């Protein structure tokens, strides 16, 4: 009895692949339109695999039912199975190259697969059948930008606007590309500090020019201060060289012949991106007055959604020990990195960020007690070419020549920047 049962199961297992093979070779029998509609319902109700099986089954009988194959390709693309989608789109366009919607879907599939050169080739082929078509030209521009050719992308999008100057999508894209290609910028910053006692208002101005290069950005600055009824100038250069992916540096060098500034200032810092959207840095600053003050600093930053948190401490060694200060900053971004609201809180005095003339009293001044609160709002024009900012701050600071007593400092600042190609 056991032998017979074992024989039956062995026979079933041997014949099962043959039965499956016959099952797989079945051809669809039925109404393809009705089955197609059912498959669409399945696909839009998160039953994608069942929908794809149904569509493939219909195609066994109707291989050139292009609407069905096109929808199948789209479901593959939605699922991130870009190779399968490409195969199906290629079949359709090889049979009927006059299907514009499939050209568009096929190009988008390559863009989503992060294959801009393949997308560009498809766009060029599509334009042979649909010359100067605005939709296809737009996708061609996207492929060119993704292939690191924003200049060519801008030329292509100009063709779209040449046909339809009111195409808002193309207008927005042109503005974005123009902003990307704006490697140069000039800007002006100004601020005034009002003291609750002792000092007259102090004025600060800065004119800067920046240039984006493939090696990183470089910024030249001319700073002007009016403090203590005197004027002073300082010339500075900031550089942000790219070292490798996720690693870049900050370099600074400045000179002045005014006692309102250090004779020489210089600094360097290294920034490293970490997993989970963290970034850390470590560096130093040096300010040369009658003697040189060294400041050691670093930062920890964290991006979460549209928010950014950072903390930066300052350690300033001196004869009386090491002065410590720090700033906690929060930014809430809006449309992009140039549109945001910021709040910062600071404790302690740092010569790097606090404006004071030392007059040989470095050790005394860096030990001053100070608490700060600042808010800022930054925004751009619709074309992203112009950027503005406004800041307001309050500082409660110990008086250098009257330790233990404090004054209040109220700061107001404005800045503007113009980007250009």
Image (spheres, rainbow, N blue to C red):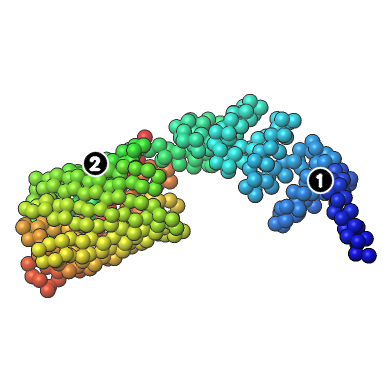
Q: Quadrant of residue 81?
A: top right
Depicted 327 relative to depicted 60: above or below = below
| Disc 2: CA contacts within 10 A as few (<14), some (14-19) or many (>=20) | some
Residue at the image position 26 percent from the left and 62 percent from the top: 313
Q: Quadrant of the C terminus?
A: top left
Would you call the spot at circle 1 few (<14 residues within 10 Å), some (14-19), or many (20 or more)?
many
* Relative image position of residue 67 (x, y in whole percent): 75, 40
Q: Quadrant of the N terminus?
A: bottom right
Q: Which residue lies at the image location 17% right of the left edge and 43% below the top edge?
A: 235
Residue 205 as seen in the image, left or right of residue 87: left
Which sits in the foreground, 393 or 354?
354
Residue 401 visible at all = yes
Q: Quadrant of residue 371?
A: bottom left
Q: Residue, x 64% and y 41% (percent of image)?
A: 83
Spatial separation of the CA atoms under disc 1 and disc 2: 66 Å
Choose mark 1 or mark 2, whichever is in front.
Answer: 1
Instruction: Give the side of residue 360 with respect to residue 184, left or right.
Output: left
Residue beneath disc 1: 57
- Locate residue 68: give its quadrant: top right
Q: Is residue 134 visible?
A: no
Seen in the picture, residue 18 relative to 64 is either above or below; the reply is: below
């Amino acid at each position: 009895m056991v032998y017979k049962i074992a024989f039956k199961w062995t026979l079933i297992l041997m014949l099962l692949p043959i039965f499956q093979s016959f099952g797989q070779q079945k051809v669809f029998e039925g109404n393809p339109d009705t089955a197609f509609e059912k498959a669409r319902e399945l696909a839009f109700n998160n039953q994608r695999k069942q929908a794809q099986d149904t569509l493939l089954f219909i195609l066994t009988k109707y291989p050139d039912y292009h609407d069905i194959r096109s929808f199948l390709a789209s479901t593959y693309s939605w699922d991130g199975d870009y190779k399968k989608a490409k195969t199906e789109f290629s079949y359709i366009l090889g049979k009927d190259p006059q299907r514009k919607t499939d050209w568009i879907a096929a190009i988008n599939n390559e863009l989503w697969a992060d294959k801009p050169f393949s997308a560009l080739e498809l766009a060029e082929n599509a334009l042979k059948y649909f010359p100067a078509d605005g939709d296809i030209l737009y996708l061609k521009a996207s492929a060119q930008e993704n292939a690191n050719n924003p200049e060519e992308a801008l030329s292509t999008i100009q063709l779209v606007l040449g046909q339809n100057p009111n195409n808002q999508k193309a207008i927005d894209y042109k503005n974005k590309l123009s902003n990307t290609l704006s490697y140069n910028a000039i800007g002006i910053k100004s601020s005034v500090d009002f003291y609750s006692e002792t000092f007259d208002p102090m004025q600060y101005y800065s004119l800067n020019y920046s240039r984006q290069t493939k090696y990183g950005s470089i910024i030249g600055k001319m700073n002007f201060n009016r403090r203590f009824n005197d004027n002073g100038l300082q010339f500075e250069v900031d550089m942000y060289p790219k070292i490798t992916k996720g690693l870049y540096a900050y370099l600074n060098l400045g000179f002045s012949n005014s006692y309102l500034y250090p004779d020489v200032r210089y600094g360097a810092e290294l920034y490293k991106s970490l997993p989970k959207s963290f970034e850390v840095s470590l560096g130093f600053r040096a300010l040369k007055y009658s003697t040189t003050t060294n400041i050691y600093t670093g930062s920890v930053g964290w991006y979460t959604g549209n928010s950014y948190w950072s903390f930066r401490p300052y350690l300033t060694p001196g004869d009386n020990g090491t002065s410590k200060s720090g700033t906690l900053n929060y930014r809430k971004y809006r449309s992009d990195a140039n549109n945001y609201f910021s709040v910062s809180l600071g404790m302690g005095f740092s010569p790097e960020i606090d404006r004071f003339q030392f007059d040989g009293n470095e050790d005394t001044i860096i030990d001053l007690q100070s608490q700060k609160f600042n808010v800022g709002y930054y925004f751009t024009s619709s074309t992203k070419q112009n950027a503005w900012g406004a800041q307001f701050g309050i500082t409660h600071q110990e008086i250098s020549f009257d330790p233990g007593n404090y004054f209040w400092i109220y700061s107001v600042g404005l800045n503007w920047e113009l980007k250009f190609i």
